[in-house]
Amino acid sequence: MSIADTNENTQPLATHRRGGGRVGRRIMRSAAVPSFPTLVRKIPAYEIVPDEAVELIHEASLSILEEVGCEFRDDEAIAMWKQAGADVTGTRVRIDRGLLMELVCKTPSEFTLNARNPERTVKVGGKNSIFVPMYGAPYVRDLENNRRYGSLEDLQNFHKLAYMAPALHSSSSIICEPMEIPVPKRHLHIIHSALKHSDKPFMGIVTSKDRAEDTMAMAGIVFGEEFVRDNPVLVSITNCNSPLVWDATMLDAMKVYARHNQPLILAPFALCGASTSASSVGAVAQVNAEALAGVAFTQLIRPGSPQIYGQFMVTVDMKTGAPMGGTPEAAQMMYLMGALARKYRLPWRTSGFHVGSKLNDAQAGYEANMLMHAAILSGANYIWHSAGWLEAGLSCGYSKFATDCEQLVGWYKYAGGVPFDDFKEAMAAVREVGPAGHFLGTQHTLEHFESAFFMPTIMDFNSFEQWNAEGAKDHDTRGREKARTMLRDYEEPKLDDGVAEALHDFIAKREKSLPDTVN
């Protein structure tokens, strides 16, 4: 896809500097970088089962929460559930279906996710979808194809790549762990890198209440404290520990972010066959119950706060216990979760390119295609892990990141539907050329050759002889070369000098008060 494309859904935004106060000063000062707006899906969602089957799963999930219950391992959360009228025994909360759905229905079906550059602001929910890079890898597969621990430089590089990729709508946050930085201080540098090296929306930190509060303080420096009290500027991930446990760490993060009206992904982390039954539909019923319990709790914290119904469901190799990516069951479960999300009118998250392959190889491609196809056709709104993911999330690859970003352009065009805006002109070209001619010189071709078809640059379609003459490079090698080129061409979207200094001062002050080791 060329940046000359004029299709409504795929027209890149040429970012530019605006005048006018603090908001204007936040906008990028560097050369314009093309960026796609929110993807508005113009293809139908695929229904893999009839409505009766969706209703069966829904009823089973409600019964789980009424009869088995879900643990909320936090005193404040337990007090809130008691006050709401739930049946509470210790940390076990049994939620009446009427109360549950009353709370879930308070969640908006769509919301705006604000970027520090307003041109990068996106919509989440409904027919809108966004692509977000991976999160949480301790290792990287680097530009020399070596596997090693991630560093702050790697994290900064991945934030730069996310900024440079037109079809990525967010910079995530912990794309890889900066392992050389002490854990108690690491979150400060992660968030600083996301805010400094990209002006797209980003993700928060959830590993403690203090770290979540630091994230909100840093967001307040960039966006303004008043603005972040009510307006979404980041998304954070909270995982239910399947089966049926919301722990204190996740609940603390929920309370910080929901009180600030910041959306959370309420996503059970399910290893199907290990932390769920060895059944796709059984796993979906359990995960749906866990996710709904999380969504409902956020509405006890702040009714009407925007939230994202989520899931991370991978099947387990029943011989070894290892998680598997890209399986048909994982795709089928996405379709079921999508149908449930539409039933509840909730924005929902799934994962796109999460694969088990250790390398950016054929296995990675097969797995990624299986899952992204399901993510798109199941109508997902927040498609996470859409760039870089290798090795079941243990590693982020530079080559994989670059090749994923290129493929996202194709998926963006696929989901945008078939345009008919030039149909009349195309038919005129047929009459102009007639039998036995060619279309290469027609006016229609000259006007549309850059935008008519997806034209990747990393994938190779040359003859064998030309490919061989150019070094016989495989896809993984070309991906690393593309990543190097993107990093070479990167120009920082500068923060306002005062904002940059305030962030620096905040980090320095907080680092003085934090230990170098985890107690």
Image (cartoon, helix red, strand yellow):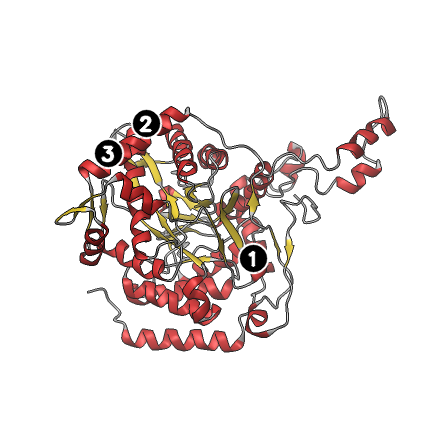
Identified by mark 3, the residue type is Ser
- Dot 1 or dot 2, earlier in sequence: 2
Q: Quadrant of the N terminus?
A: top right
User: Tag on residue 489?
Assistant: none
The spot of residue 406 in percent (x, y) is 57, 44
Q: What residue sits right under mark 1 in the picture?
A: 120
Residue ID at (56%, 52%): 165
| Farthest left residue in view | 90
Mark 1–mark 3 Cα distance, whole angstroms, equals 42 Å
Label 3 crowding class (10 Å Cα cut-off): few <14, some 14-19, many 20+?
A: some
Residue ID at (63%, 45%): 10
User: Tag on residue 56?
Assistant: 2
Q: Secondary structure at mark 3?
A: helix
Q: Is residue 122 left or right of residue 279?
A: right
Q: Is residue 139 left or right of residue 86?
A: right
> Does residue 348 sit above or below 74 in this rendering?
above
Q: Is residue 72 left or right of residue 284?
A: left
Identified by mark 2, the residue type is Leu
User: Tag on residue 63?
Assistant: 3
Mark 1–mark 2 Cα distance, whole angstroms, equals 40 Å
Q: Are marks 2 and 3 in contact (CB under 8 Å)?
A: no
Q: Is residue 277 left or right of residue 416?
A: left
Label 1 crowding class (10 Å Cα cut-off): few <14, some 14-19, many 20+?
A: many
Q: Quadrant of the C terminus?
A: bottom left
**As rendered, which of 342 and 393 lies closer to the eye?**
342
> Does residue 485 sit above or below 276 in this rendering?
below
Identified by mark 1, the residue type is Arg
